[in-house]
Image (cartoon, coloured by chain):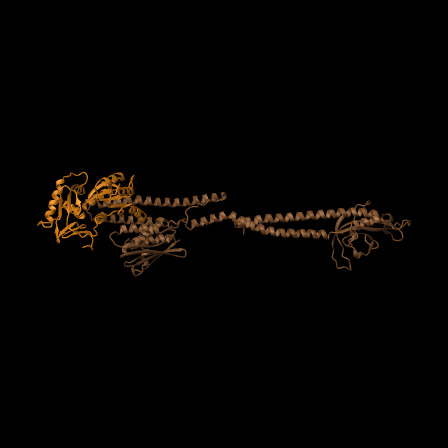
Amino acid sequence: MRVLIVEDKAPIREQLAADLKKNGFTVDVAADGAQGLYIATEYPIDIAVVDLGLPHVTGLEIIKNVRAKGLEYPIVTLTVRDRWETKVEVLEAGADDYLVKPIHSEELAARLRALLRRTQGWTQSELNCPPVRLNLTEQRVYVDENEITLTAYEYRVLEHLMMHAGQVISKTHLTDSLYEEDTDRDSNVIEVFIRRLRQKLDKDDTLKPIETLRGRGYRFTLDCQRTINSK
Amino acid sequence: MMGSLRSRQLVSGFTIIVVGILILGILLSMNIYHRKTDAIIADLESTSYNLLGYIEFNVEPKGGTFTIGESNRDEASIFVSARQLAQSSKERFAYIWGVDEQKIVWSTSDSRNSEDFALFDFKEIAARPKTDSYTPEAKSMQSVPQANSDEGPAPYMVAAQTFSFNLNAESKTNKKSDYIFVVAASTKEVGREISDLIMVFAILFFVSVILILIAQLASSFWVVHPIREFEEEVRDIENGNKGLITNEYPDELVPIKNTINALIGHEKGQKQRYKDALDDLAHSLKTPLAAIQSHIGSDNFHDIPANHPGLAGIASEMEYMQEIISRQLRKAMVTTDNAIIMAQPIRPLLTRLAATMKKVHRDKEFEIRINVDEYSKCRLDNEDLMELFGNLLNNACKFCDKLVEISSYRDNDMLVIDIDDDGMGFPSENPSKLLKRGIREDSKTEGQGIGLAVSTEIISAVNGRIELLVSPYVGARVRLHLPV
């Protein structure tokens, strides 16, 4: 999942970026409002973390602009102002969550994950598409109660596909959500990950969890239980 | 009495007009009286002149008598009747009083009986300086009551002159006898006319007093009305129904209006500046603190083991500092007591908060019912209101099962708001402990504590009240009494 961090204070920004990477996110950073707004509207990001007290373009303006452009991805705001007045204002402007500084990276990561799965209609922290289960907090994958060992990148690809189960995800989109802006891209890498995932999840080739749509991308095909009650 | 503008205006106007009418009446009646008496005086004086011309003094037969000469008798009788001197003896008359005899020796009527005439203080007349020539001078005098009459003294206009005659020209005794010639007219009529006039004046006076009173009251209402209106508007501001004085007022009130508006603006500005300064301070402290915390959390200290006790100590102290800052900041925010706060309708605020709560607690399926009408207002700063209901609603949403309900009603001059949920409720033993938590500096923030503590601070700053009860849904009920 690709996350944008807009924060003008360098130590906090770097700390958050490092911690989120550790938690399996692909991180873009912006040091001021203008840059943040550019990335937020021009890049295919999945979620944004925006500080409210930014110079020039405020966090609130970024949120309003992003929403005005019709972008629906979740936005988490960071602020020092622990007041409901601000909270209501920010949430009404279109933000989805609100964290008061100091930020604990673990909490932020958990909130981001929760928001991401929620926007895709998942209400639990475990993506359950029998027989495949993916636990977002533990970042573990099970097939029929057997844990499957995945590399970090393999996990990210699977998480992305399962999160958007039933939807076609293009190869570029997958690449974007895996790599930061300036890293070398090799589209073959995705094919390699998909092949490995198929082998690991579906040893005897009966499940066929990931479908390839030539020229369009990939789709996770298994039926999923997004809410607790729906069977 | 003089404390009110209206009474001042009433009393001053009333006094001026009443005194004016009184003076006017007195002057007018005096003038009329003088004119009347002057006419009588002139009449008496000329009468006495003419009458003297007709009268002759006869030494003979004895003692001296006064008669009207034969040649003049007809003329004199015409004159007497023309001057109405013989009609009613007590109204107009002329007689000669013999000082020696102590009786009337001659009169214009046939009677010589002193009871038929009014007698005067002859001693006083006799004591007047004597003049050689006759210069009649009429003066107002009181009649002297007579012994066998029950009439009191009556007012007369009297022209009187004392004459001395030698009773016996031949005798060398030179004995002189004094006689007083009196021409008098009753001024009772004039007095009655004047008193009638005064009566009319008195009636006029009372009628005009009543009319003036009515007019004054009406005009004072009219004059004082804008002041009343002004007062009402100021009271509205005081009660928080209005922010500024906006009505149009007469020129005299405009400076006060502007001054009050400036004061209100100043106070608001002051509060805003205070808040901003506090905010800036907290902001500037929190940011470096947050930066220090992320330094400690990062790998910058890789030569020091992560579980180094010193580092952990610093980190926990940091957290504590952050906490103090936010708590003190919140406290400072709410304890700014401002006399001029507009009453806010709480419904729009609650609907906004409800939408926010749905977003904050989106993992939960629950309903927020707002049974608060548009007329429910309370006098709290907008930010404080938001903070108050934000905290309480957040608690309710956090602990509810399926339902949060907000309802309000008026209780005298308080707005009572119940926030109910269907959760597990407050701990049964000593729930009021929850309200005190957070006010103590070292208390930890968890559960409902901090929200309730902040709410308590806000409420006590505006002299409201908070109660922890049991909701009809068996969960918690927070009851607020807020000033209207």
* Residue B276 appears in the figure: yes
In percent of the image, x 26 and y 52: which residue is there?
Answer: B361
In percent of the image, x 64 and y 52: which residue is there?
Answer: B202
Question: Which residue extends farthest right?
Answer: B170
x, y percentage for residue A93?
29, 45
Q: Quadrant of residue B424?
A: bottom left
Residue B170 in the image: above or below residue B430: above
x, y percentage for residue B141?
75, 51
Could you tell me how many numbered marks the image carries? 0
* Residue B332 appears in the figure: no
* Rendering colour (chain B): brown
Question: Which residue extends farthest left?
Answer: A204
Which of the pair A177/B450 is nearer the observer? A177
Which of the pair B67/B342 is nearer the observer? B67
Question: In the shown orientation, is residue A133 left or right of residue B317?
Answer: left
x, y percentage for residue B362?
25, 51
Tell which chain the image draws in orange: A
Question: In the shown orientation, is residue B105 left or right of residue A199?
Answer: right
Which of the pair B326/A29 is nearer the observer? A29
Which of the pair B320/B115 is nearer the observer? B115
x, y percentage for residue A156?
16, 46
